[in-house]
Amino acid sequence: MAISIDTVYQRVLALANKEQRGYITPQEFNLFANQVQQEIFEQYFYDTNQFAKVPGNDTVYADVDDMLEEKMQIFQEQQTVNYNVPNDVYRIYRVELNNINCEILRTKDFNDIFQGGPLTKPSTTRPIANVRNNVLRVSSGNNVTNIALVFYFRKPRKVEWGYTVIDNKALYDPSTSKTTNFELHASEESELVYRILSYAGVTLQKPQLTQSAGAAVSGQIQQEKQ
């Protein structure tokens, strides 16, 4: 379920104004909101990599892994690609050719294996894939094709608090075509609020706001990883 952008904006305004720390314009909020959504999204991949390297009992991190997977599933897509990969691709994690999983290689390794001898060349049971400059290449033998099924994580869609100006005041207007809610998992709402507040503190030249918001973010992250 998406997180209401208006709910986040109202919480940000309420916390910023609690001690008369200033007003955050819709334009500033939308800028901060997209920056923060991207940061939280990218953190999923760093966390996944971090927990994968931790030795010991897997059950200790089972809940964290399950939550990360649930958060990341929102952005999982699959699409049959013909030459160019989709513009919203953030990271490709699987490529299939004729229902066979391809080994995804760097450009040099792909070229070396494709041009290699019979013992190293790709085959129908061991196809290879490469993506460079958004162009897909796949091979299962002597030829290269640009058509395959690609599984990937897409980028979060741009969020925007849509509004109508009445009596010189910006009022939330959910009917505007610009209004777009956050796609992040519902559990990220508080972190969104605090991270946006942290950026707002810099703009408003209120270091205390930045510090308190940063402390709140750190506390929440620590709690999630316990």
Image (cartoon, rainbow, N blue to C red):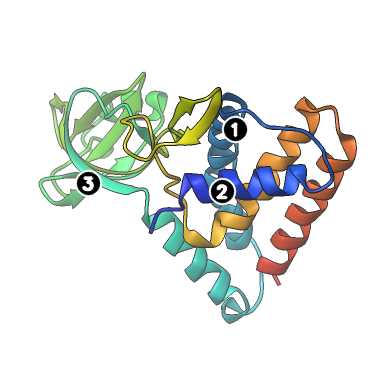
Where residue 127 sits: x, y (%)?
21, 41
Q: Nearer the viewer, mark 3 or mark 2?
A: 2
User: SS for tag 2?
Assistant: helix
Question: Gap between marks 3 and 2, in whole Å?
Answer: 48 Å
Tell me which amino acid carries mark 3: Arg
Whether residue 60 is situated above or below residue 166 in the rendered picture: below
Crowding near the residue tagged with mark 2, few <14, some 14–19, many ≥20 C-alpha atoms within 10 Å: many
The answer to the question of whether label 1 and label 2 lie on touching residues, with beta carbons closer than 8 A, is: no
Question: Which residue does the numbered mark 3 point to in the structure image?
Answer: 126
Q: Residue furthest right?
A: 208
**Rendered image: mark on residue 29:** 1
Where residue 105 sits: x, y (%)?
37, 35
The C terminus appears in which quarter of the rendering? bottom right
Which comes sooner in the sequence, label 1 or label 2? Answer: 2
Whether residue 1 is situated above or below residue 134 in the rendered picture: below
Q: Nearer the viewer, mark 3 or mark 1?
A: 1
Question: Gap between marks 3 and 1, in whole Å?
Answer: 49 Å
Which comes sooner in the sequence, label 3 or label 2? Answer: 2
Corner quadrant of residue 91: top left
User: In the image, is 78 to the left or to the right of 171?
Assistant: left
**Rendered image: mark on residue 8:** 2
Q: Residue at x 86, y 33 (%)?
A: 206
Whether residue 25 is situated above or below residue 188 in the rendered picture: above
Tell me which amino acid carries mark 2: Val
Crowding near the residue tagged with mark 3, few <14, some 14–19, many ≥20 C-alpha atoms within 10 Å: some
Please tell me which residue lies in front, 150 or 215: 215
Q: Residue furthest front?
A: 167
Where residue 134 sits: x, y (%)?
32, 22
